[in-house]
Image: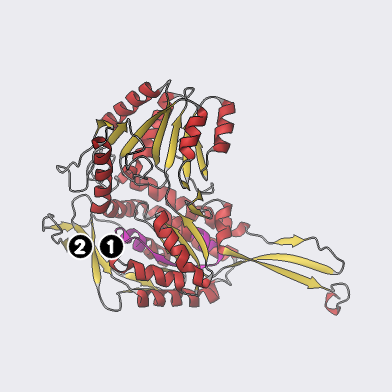
Amino acid sequence: MFSRILEVKHSFIRTTIPITNRSMSTIKELAFVNGKWISAKNKATFPVYNPVDGQIIGHVPEMDASDTREAIDAAHDSFQSYRKTTAKERSDLLRSWYNLLVKHSEDLATILTKENGKSLNESRAEIRYGNSFIEWYAEEARRVNGEVLQAPVRNREMLLLKQPVGVAGFITPWNFPQAMIARKAGPALAAGCTCVVKPAGDTPFTALAMAELAEKAGFPPGTINVITSSVTNSVEVGKEICSNPKVRILSFTGSTQVGKLLYKQCASTMKRLSLELGGNAPYVVFNSADLDLAVAGAMASKFRNTGQTCVSSNRFFVQEGVFEKFTEKFLERINSEIKLGDGLKEGVTNGPLINENQLQIVKDLVEDAVKKGAKLHCGGKVLENLGPLFYAPTLLTDVTKEMDIYKREIFGPVAVIHKFKSEDDALREANDVNVGLAGYFYSRDISQVFRVARKMEVGMVGVNEGLISCAEAAFGGIKESGLGREGSSHGMEEYFDIKYVCIGNVENSNFIN
């Protein structure tokens, strides 16, 4: 237990707040490199704010490229021995980590809520979700096998071996600070890779708490490293991870714009890439849909984490036969079920946006749409009485292509509903974007279900379901939504090199006797 002196930022008030009591040790304000808790070489730090009220919850090291190289070197050195561990040993380590993550789930959820702002219930759900990947890959670690091939000629044996690629660099976002690390570290560690994790500057404490538990689980020094930096140094830290030849794979979750930049920076070392980038998910409701089910799915998909998820429903297309009824039911649920506030308080369902930049983006998009003729059914304003970053849940219709919001990934609590006539119309609009992460549609016509699922240009489709992510499924997109898959057995393939071994002259060799 400790307290922090809060600093004034913009109009925020100077005061002192205690960190919630937890069974874990106090929040770590140091980075974790080579099994040690360290400061930045230049001793610089930066504050981390609670988005609910702008109060500082702690400081972490402001690390730069030289600190990053130190972490990469540690991971590279550790890889030389960790790569030799057996699948059973790696499975046991992951299982131990999973058990500790489960034991301290409430502690992790509290930390997550403080630095991210989402409700405690949502944080608990994220921790369960993230933990499921560690559990899954603890089990998958022992299921990795190579192949024995049929040789095209006599006296030859041909094998395919799967070997870990090396050091894995992770750059993770603020919207799911625990789950995105777990989804990447689980398969990497199961495969025999070591890790360097760069969490978002808005949410580093969850990552550091995970590292503390990994240390307690018995992972060798250098196997898992966590470096911290704010926006000030993020560019040079990211560039070092991308350009350093000792890092053999980069896994990044974030915007398409940043993903493209990292893609370019990785070219010099021909690094393997796993990119989970922006989405602009369509949500289509056909006339045959169960409307109550469709509205429930829309609430879960649109307003989870205050709309700040890459798979959030972003563009609603509702067929004209049910448009009015769906809009009416959706509006009723928005007004009756969403309660904004401090996520640690009882009954709160949604928190603030993560920072001022995100708030301004959402605010500008809605104001532009309303100014150009969109119909505002609810919301459309900043709720300053709750805090500086709260934006009211918003529902818009009559949005046209001239409005900035029409094809923009909103990343906020704003639902935009369009009316359509035919299935072809809906698919044309749903697919008319340069990204393709997730898509959703509701229909009770079985022929339409198979037809639309195949034609929707996304990597993941939810049919009559608004929440589709799980450890067992392959998560990822097409088009400019990224490369590779996370989760499922396919998630480990990113972290293996396949080595072809050809053994010739087998029958003529003396060594077979």
Crowd band around label 1 with a 10 angstrom C-alpha radius: few (<14), some (14–19), many (20+) = many
| Residue in view at x 52 percent, y 45 percent | 459
Residue 90 versus residue 45: which sits nearer the camera? 45
| Residue in view at x 40 percent, y 57 percent | 257
On the question of residue 477 being in view, the answer is no
- Give the labeled residue for mark 2: 2
Q: Position of residue 378 (x, y in %)?
A: 25, 31
Left or right position of 27 against 226? left
Report the magenta residues as a range. Answer: 186-209
On the question of residue 429 being in view, the answer is yes
Judge whether residue 193 is colored magenta.
Answer: yes
Disc 2 secondary structure class: loop
In this rendering, the answer to whether 44 lies above or below 95 is: below
Residue 107 versus residue 205: which sits nearer the camera? 205
Left or right position of 308 against 142? left
Number of on-image labels: 2
Q: Residue furthest front?
A: 402
Judge whether residue 277 is colored magenta.
Answer: no
Q: What is the number of the mark on residue 27?
A: 1
In this rendering, the answer to whether 282 lies above or below 112 is: above
Q: Position of residue 470 (x, y in %)?
A: 49, 46
